[in-house]
Image: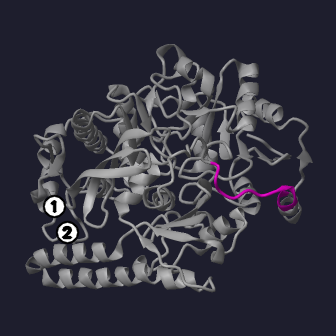
Amino acid sequence: MNILGISGAVHDAAAALVQDGKLVAAVEEERFKRVKHVGFAGYFGYDTGLPHASIDYCLKTAGIKADDVDAVGYYYDPWQEFRSHLAFRLARAHRNPARAAYHLVQSVTLLKDHLKTEPLFNRRRKTPLKFHWLSHYATHNAAAFFCSPFQDALILSIDAKGERDSCCAAVGEGNQIRVIETIPYPHSWGMFYMEVTKYLGFKPGHDEYKVMGLASFGKPTYLEQFRQIVRTQPDGSFRFDLSWFDPTFTGPDMLSRKFFDTFGPARVPNSAIESKHEDIAASLQEILEETVLAYLKALRIRTGKKNVCLSGGVVLNCVLNGKILESGLFDGIFIPPNPGDAGCAVGAALHIHHQLNGAPHSYVMDHAFLGPAYGDGEILAALDNAKVDYRKMDDPAKEVARLIADGRIVAWYQGRMEWGPRALGNRSLLADPTRAEMRDVVNKWVKHREDFRPFAPSVLEEKAPEYFEHITDSPFMLFITQVKDDKKAKVPAITHVDGTARPQTVSQKTNPLYWQVIKEFENITGVPCVLNTSFNIMGEPIVCTPPQAIRCFYGTGIDALAIGDYLVLKQRMS
């Protein structure tokens, strides 16, 4: 049976395909369209109606056509969302009728954008197929639980907004998921974190990870003020004091005058970052951890579940995830590699397979290499077309490890592309973590990004406990934890200002070639990890095709490109 999942009308468009119970393909539309977080609806001006390129890739990978698809799961229930939006806007219309009318028109437009996806897909088929319109949190929950190794777990999905809620707690047992409770919008951690991101001069919906990184430089001196904004309830859940927000929830700033009177004017984008901004970021991060941990503790007691699965854009906050790990609340924690809305494509397909069709829960996602791959023919054609000098490597792992140890920045392009926002060893830039200056070198010559942002390590799975606290298995690079005290001096380039790192554990079973690179680097240096950052420049998606890899290589200060079995070197290396 072939089940297609689709997500991301407004942002983070993606498609995934489950074939006979196994997830065989998953990819985000941004990798083809080259626009980060791109959606497929006309709501924000980019209208393709469907993530066509992602769907094409999934069908091709599975060796099928659209007529061979047995079911399509869509990550939203558009009518439920429309009714919720209508009620929400009408209840506040008296405060600003013009704004309410504008947003109601947008709601109608979005409803039309959602609903046209079914006839658009059916144009690909000889016989029409009716979509399964699934609730947003049903797909988030399924993406977490049905990819996990657990048969019994608590599930918490938390982001900006579903059809009418902003957080969902559920339990997964076997092939069924049962919702316990939801927290209604606008009591939304995702929305609030985005608004403070904007207040701090960054791009909301894109730059929340920058705020997370900035928080490490500050102190939570504004924690008491933030505790007035969001409060833990007697049952352990959280609620926001809505007086801190625009009462219409329609303005250019969702935050109210009360917020600006308390914290001062917003930072102008690209202006100097002051200690005040660092302290606000630190306070925001602290209250997030405080309230979510309190809720998880309460849910742990109420459900008795020893394992937890997490999903939603908020759990891309790796510092929060690290705190959950360190808390010891749960025996096991699983977060899929793409917990944001793009990941709902996987959840939609798996929800149909398990929850609706009754198939047993047997699939476990132990790697994220579900995207496009390009063979020798395509790689060689791209190299020849670019008229570059290259040679075939006798031992790619050994040669690349030597380049890294010699202080070179190496672009590593291998196999199938990663599913999710992290480069996990197939579309990565690699460097020496033992050289303190390497963080600044990579930032200056390649990434061109803010200097306060850290780089992550990829570490041999079996050696991770020697270097990092609490980490034994983190293949998707979604937990931040402390670097052990006796190892911080050995790996300064990946140790953040607060002594933490965001490690990826690399398994010989799931990525043997990348594991071998790190092992060869250990043989040379004695250190079983490398600096790993995504193969792209700031503002662009991770490279997908060989021509994109070559273009990024020659447009930046990368020293070497290892693409498949072939090596390209620049004449003058840094």
Q: Are marks 1 and 2 in contact (CB under 8 Å)?
A: yes
Identity, as a three-letter code, of the amino acid under mark 1: Phe
Provide the residue designation for mark 2: 249
Residue found 73% across the figure and 26% down from its top: 519
Crowd band around label 1 with a 10 angstrom C-alpha radius: few (<14), some (14–19), many (20+): many
Corner quadrant of residue 104? bottom left
Which element type, helix, strand or loop, lies under badge 1? Answer: loop
Residue 49: percent from the left, percent from the top? Answer: 50, 80
Identity, as a three-letter code, of the amino acid under mark 2: Phe
Residue found 49% across the figure and 75% down from its top: 40
Point out the stretch of residues depicted in magenta. 369-379
Residue found 17% across the figure and 75% down from its top: 87
Q: Is residue 372 magenta?
A: yes
Residue 516: percent from the left, percent from the top? Answer: 75, 31
Residue found 48% across the figure and 68% down from its top: 73
Provide the residue designation for mark 1: 245
Residue 215: percent from the left, percent from the top? Answer: 34, 39
Q: Nearer the viewer, residue 544 or 365?
A: 365
In the rendered structure, the answer to whether residue 529 lies left or right of residue 223 reads right
